[in-house]
Image (spheres, rainbow, N blue to C red):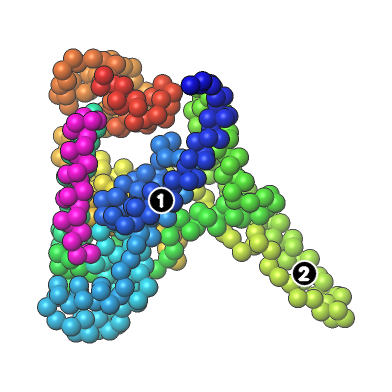
Amino acid sequence: MEQRQLSDAQQTAEYKKLHDKYAPAVFDIVLELKGFYVKLAQTGSTRPDVLPKQYLDRAAKLQDDAPAKPVEEICAIIEQSYGKPVRQVFRAIDPKPLGAASIGQAHRAVLLDGQEVAVKVQHPDAESFFRWDIKTIQDFCRYFQPAHLPYLVEVEKQFMTEFNYVEEAKNLDTVRSNIAKSPYAAKVAIPKPKMELCTKEVLVMEFLKGRKLLDGIQDHFEAIAADKGVTVEFLKQDQERKDKEREAHGLDIETGPSSLQLRLYGLTLGAKRLARRIGRVSYEYTLGFIAPKKWAPREDEQHQLLNLPDILKLIMDVHGYEIFVDGSFNGDPHPGNILLLEDGRLGLIDYGQVKHISREHRVHLAKLIVALAGGSRDDIIEVLTKDMRIRTTNMDPYFLEKQARLMIDNDDRTVTEGMNAQLFVEHLHT
């Protein structure tokens, strides 16, 4: 049988056909299996370097919009957990979920005293399904991809902490109290749990008023797209094209505009909007008296610009403070767990995977990050072997450095030497 070599463009086109065909079926299976598979999709949703676009777009929807159960089932779970009717605890529960995750969902509710709260409820059998799912995947990797087994063992340890909402409430209160005493107290809000109303299956906490960061980002780019006369999809495709070109030449991915550049752009866009409003007012006070005209708001006037560099820096600073100063931090931060509050603060929610590390480990981690950021390979190896006391079979400096970069630094193709991250990990272990 004759075989022909396809060009890169032809290969891309053929793969696109396959991804277009199979991505919907794959996600139908994910939604049917639920649990750990939804969690994997959520994790993959932040990895455009790993998942093709067809899968990435579907995975992104699961960050805070996983399959939800009817409110009647949720109320039944609450009643079983409390051992009394819902009406004896809550005046009302909003039937529409605030969000749904891999093991449960959250609803807005009102307590008997009138206080607004968020109620997080765990789905029945979520824990048992998760245990079976992770065991199945670990067994597969044990025989066919052993290089990934240590990662899955750690994943199991981390995710198993999510199934006790009393512990989550305690961790939530610990991190909230720490941040309330930090330099970021005026910029960040973390909900306070109502400990007396928390059980293994139900977590009740302060309700934070705001919208999801993801929605704010969508508005941000819709404003920019409208100002430029293009679509958001065009902006995404144009950036992806630029990223691929830079990657093909061995260059780092291009960073976005700086905080100052965005402020200046925001002023420019605001000036354009103001000029249009002045034009409308001028018309209304002149010809408008003779020929009244109904003004429809332009599309770019309906959306708000965000200073994303400032927001991202604040998110990084707060999580860095949690890790290096307090030693208690969210082990599963993703965009679906960040809110833009009405008072201008950021809201940080979902502390189901809180990690606690000692001061000694924090110092070692800090030294490793400094070495990765600006040190030599020898500096990195010294921290790994002398401070962290890491031992491997061969103690290969190349392996140790690459493994540290993949785990702590970054895993773009400048680190993976042009390979997909998964293939590079397997390459390291051969």
Q: Residues within 10 Å of mark 2 (few under 14, many from 20)?
A: some
Is 149 in front, or is 311? 149
- Write down the region rendered in magenta: 122-146
State how far apart marks 2 and 1 are (Cα). Answer: 51 Å
Q: Nearer the viewer, mark 2 or mark 1?
A: 1
Helix, strand or loop at disc 2? helix
Which label number is shown at residue 301?
A: none
Side of 100 where 193 appears, left or right: left
Q: Which of the 4 image quarters holds residue 361?
A: top left
For the point 18% across and 14% down, which residue is it?
A: 394
**Amino acid type, callout 2:** Arg
Q: How many marks?
A: 2
Q: Who comes first in sequence, dot 2 or dot 1?
A: 1
- The picture places residue 10, in percent across and down from the top left corner, at 57, 30
**Amino acid type, callout 1:** Ala
- The picture places residue 295, in percent across and down from the top left corner, at 74, 72
Assign the magenta stretch its main secondary structure.
Answer: helix
Q: Quadrant of the C terminus?
A: top left
Q: Which residue is mark 2?
A: 280
Q: Would residue 103 be visible to someone looking at this image?
A: yes
Asked if the stretch drawn in magenta spans residue 138, the answer is yes
Q: Is residue 124 above or below residue 245?
A: below
Q: Is residue 358 above or below residue 199?
A: above
Q: Which residue is mark 1?
A: 25
- The picture places residue 278, in percent across and down from the top left corner, at 76, 66
Asked if the stretch drawn in magenta spans residue 182, the answer is no
For the point 41% across and 21% down, which residue is it?
A: 417
Q: Would residue 315 be visible to someone looking at this image?
A: no
User: In this view, which residue lies farthest toward the front?
Assistant: 1
Q: Which of the 4 image quarters holds residue 352?
A: bottom left
Is 268 in front, or is 424? 424
